[in-house]
Image: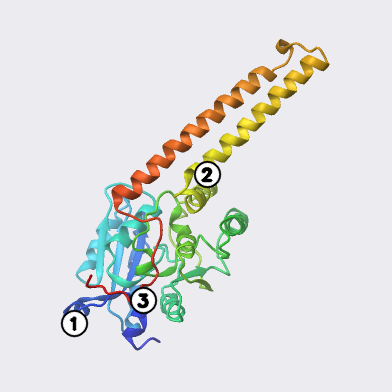
């Protein structure tokens, strides 16, 4: 399917010595695992069967997310049998996003593919994702077009959530929740994920100028156990989406949003105040007969608080960038610069 290793590392921005290349890993498979002991043997068998024909140097990073069903013992039994298997065991259950982040942090491949451990993602789609990636993309997101899940509780709710996410983020994908995705490591290496934000990596990547696409992938019915997620996850996803939207627009200028809120509340307070005076002068309505004086005072107080909060946020933003040595921009390419200087 893919015969040349050089194809998977196209677009790399740094050179390596011949010794480094010999020890390099082309492809990292990251799979978060939480109480999936029954699925692990078939998962590893199917992964190795799908990856060997690709003729790539690969590693499989299994992240045990604090499982309590013996998943870690099952994984350890396969280490001797599968030398490419690496295990990251988290001390406690931290959630899927944290588990994926742990896998990304320990991945060494030029390309990283994430896949669920419950066998609903098809390992045979990994090669297809890589082929699509080699067409010039930085992120290829899987789309479970024919999803084998509960019609209303999973499918309908998921479609609504995906449309909402696409509308808010302006990054239009059919299926944000599909874990099966392929990434160029150079694009996601500096990302930090929290909450349920692993599904939003394509959004982050797009905002950073990466080329993102989506392709249909096979989806299979769950064979073992049951889903670890309920409808309450939708609320968490929406809150996380609003948070990253805030980061995208206001991370380097937080005072703009807090200042806007402050000015809006101040104007509303003034309008309420003048309406209160109008009632008093023209309609002889006593101040104590209406709640307008209290409302005006509250709006003025909240306006001042929003203004001060904006100043604090601005100070924190500047401290963050300067203490981390970061810049509020991302350089995509440098041309004709003397790197020796």
* Residue assigned mark 2: 256
**Viewer-side residue, 286 vs 217:** 286
Query: Which is more N-terminal, label 2 or label 3?
Result: 2
Q: Tell me the quarter of the picture where residue 271 sits.
A: top right
Residue 313: image location, x then y, percent: 43, 40
**Which label is found at residue 335?**
3
Quarter of the image that includes the N terminus: bottom left
Query: Which is more N-terminal, label 1 or label 3?
Result: 1
Residue 155: image location, x then y, percent: 59, 59
Query: SS for tag 1?
Result: helix
* Residue assigned mark 1: 18
Quarter of the image that includes the C terminus: bottom left
**In the picture provided, is 124 more to the left or to the right than 266?**
left
Query: Which is more N-terminal, label 1 or label 2?
Result: 1
**In the picture provided, is 281 more to the left or to the right than 15?**
right
Residue 26: image location, x then y, percent: 30, 77
């Amino acid at each position: 399917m893919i015969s040349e290793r050089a194809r998977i590392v196209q677009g790399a921005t740094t050179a390596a010595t011949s010794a480094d290349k010999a020890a390099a890993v082309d492809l990292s498979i990251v799979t978060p695992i939480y109480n999936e002991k029954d699925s692990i043997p078939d998962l590893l068998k199917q992964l190795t069967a799908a990856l060997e024909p690709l003729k790539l140097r690969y590693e499989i990073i299994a992240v045990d997310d604090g499982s309590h069903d013996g998943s870690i013992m099952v994984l350890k039994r396969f280490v001797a049998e599968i030398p490419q298997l690496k295990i990251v065991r988290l001390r406690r259950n931290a959630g899927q996003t944290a588990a994926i982040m742990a896998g990304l942090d320990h991945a060494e491949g030029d390309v990283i593919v994430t896949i669920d451990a419950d066998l609903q993602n098809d390992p045979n789609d990994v090669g297809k994702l890589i082929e699509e990636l080699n067409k010039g993309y930085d992120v290829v997101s899987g789309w479970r077009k024919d999803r084998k899940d509960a019609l209303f509780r999973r499918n309908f709710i998921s479609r609504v959530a995906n449309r909402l996410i696409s509308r808010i983020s302006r990054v239009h994908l059919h299926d944000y929740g599909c874990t099966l995705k392929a990434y160029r490591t150079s694009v996601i290496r500096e990302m930090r994920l929290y909450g349920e934000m692993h599904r939003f990596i394509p959004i982050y990547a797009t905002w950073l100028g990466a080329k993102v696409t989506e392709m249909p992938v096979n989806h299979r019915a769950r064979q073992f156990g049951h889903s670890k997620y309920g409808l309450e996850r939708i609320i968490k996803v929406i809150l996380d989406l609003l948070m990253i939207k805030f980061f995208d627009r206001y991370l380097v200028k937080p005072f703009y949003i807090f200042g806007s809120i402050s000015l809006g509340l101040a104007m509303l307070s003034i309008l309420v105040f003048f309406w209160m005076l109008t009632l008093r002068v023209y309609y002889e309505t006593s101040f104590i007969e209406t709640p307008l004086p209290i409302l005006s005072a509250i709006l003025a107080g909240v306006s001042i608080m929003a203004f001060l909060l904006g100043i604090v946020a601005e100070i924190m933003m500047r401290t963050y960038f300067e203490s981390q040595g970061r810049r509020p921009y991302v350089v995509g390419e440098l041309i004709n610069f003397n790197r020796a200087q």
